[in-house]
Amino acid sequence: MRRRREIIPGQRYRKLGFGAMLWEVVGLSEDALGNTHVRLRQVGDPRTLKTLAASVLDDPSQFQLVA
């Protein structure tokens, strides 16, 4: 089982693949079942927001943490 890294507001992630974009974590929430969701803002267009399951953001085939 892969160990999940800590996700905190302010971290930036690059979406891998075609049309790679830079996203910044702006918040986290937990649903009624205990699943964590991450609210992201596109760095180049702060009006563009999306919410993903933390497991998607933690998938190295989809997102890369930018140092």
Image: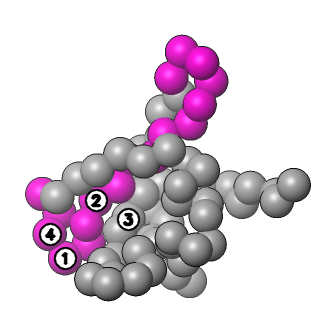
Residue 57 is labelled as none
Circles 2 and 3: CB distance less than 8 Å?
Answer: yes
Residue 9 sits above or below residue 61 on the image: above
Three-letter residue code for mark 4: Asp
Q: CA distance from mark 2 to mark 4?
A: 8 Å
> Quick check: 36 left or right of 18?
right
Residue 24 is marked as 3
Q: CA distance from mark 3 to mark 4?
A: 11 Å
Tell me which label, 3 or 1, sits earlier in the chain. Answer: 3
N-term-proximal mark, 2 vs 3: 3
Horizontal and vertical percent for residue 46?
17, 63
Q: Is residue 8 visible?
A: no
What residue is shown with label 1? Answer: 44
Image position of 49 with respect to 37: above or below = below
Looking at the figure, which quarter contains the C terminus? Answer: bottom right
Residue in the image at 17% along x and 58% along y: 48
Residue 31: x percent and y percent?
51, 23
Could you classify mark 3 by the number of other residues whose Cα lies within 10 Å: few (under 14), some (14-19), or many (20 or more)? many
Callout 2: SS: strand
State the count of labels: 4
Query: Which residue appears at 44% of the width and 80% of the height?
Result: 16
Q: Which residue is mark 2?
A: 41
Give the residue type at disc 2. Arg
Q: Nearer the viewer, residue 3 or 25?
A: 3
Residue 25 relative to residue 36: left or right:
left
In percent of width and height, residue 11 lies at: 49, 66
Mark 4 touches mark 1? (CB < 8 Å) = yes
Q: Which mark is residue 45?
A: 4
Give the residues drawn in magenta, as a range: 31-47
Which is more toward the observer, 60 or 25?
60
Separation of disc 1 and disc 2 at Cα? 9 Å
